[in-house]
Image (tube, rainbow, N blue to C red):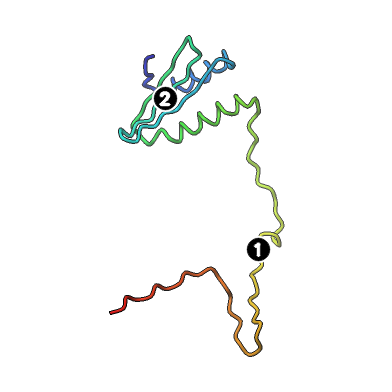
Amino acid sequence: MVYIISWQQYQEAAEHLYASSPRKTRYSVKWRSSEGKLVLKITDDVTCLKFKTHSSIFLGRFEALNRSLIQKMMNSRPVPATVEQVPPATLSTPKPQATSKLPGTPAVSTGGGVKKKKGKKK
């Protein structure tokens, strides 16, 4: 159980370890808030790979590794991100019309506003 220092080496080794024995491989993540340390561990009971960091720079890389491993564990291919064409009429949301029930009173929208706090009595 030696910590791998380079992220690139850890990512490649972790994906290779999972590919070699997918049924036995376990992956765990530990976050120690008191120390501000993130520890990643992947093992197949024979080989154990660990990576630890104190830097928040690795969070994006960690998320990419998680996505990659989860897609492999789900046995699915990544869906390419496509932007569908939406007609402009469906993009605009209609504004709610405020109606007054009593004649002669102005129409007031009943939004979910916050009530003012009452002042302290002297």
Spatial separation of the CA atoms under disc 1 and disc 2: 45 Å
User: Compared with residue 108, is residue 18 higher up or lower down, i.e. above or below?
Assistant: above
- Where is residue 1 drawn, in percent x and y? 39, 14
- Looking at the image, do the residues carrying marks 1 and 2 touch, with CB atoms under 8 Å apart? no
- Where is residue 75 drawn, in percent x and y? 65, 25
Determine whether, in the image, residue 16 is placed left or right of residue 39. Answer: right
Frontmost residue, 67 versus 44: 44
Which three-letter amino acid code belongs to the residue tagged 1? Ser
Label 1 vs 2, first from the N-terminus: 2
User: For mark 1, what is the residue?
Assistant: 92
User: Compared with residue 98, is residue 85 higher up or lower down, i.e. above or below?
Assistant: above
Q: Residue at x 60, y 24 (%)?
A: 73
Element assignment for label 2: helix
Q: Quadrant of residue 41?
A: top left
- Where is residue 90 drawn, in percent x and y? 70, 60
User: For mark 2, what is the residue?
Assistant: 7
Which three-letter amino acid code belongs to the residue tagged 2? Trp
Q: Residue at x 44, y 28 (%)?
A: 29
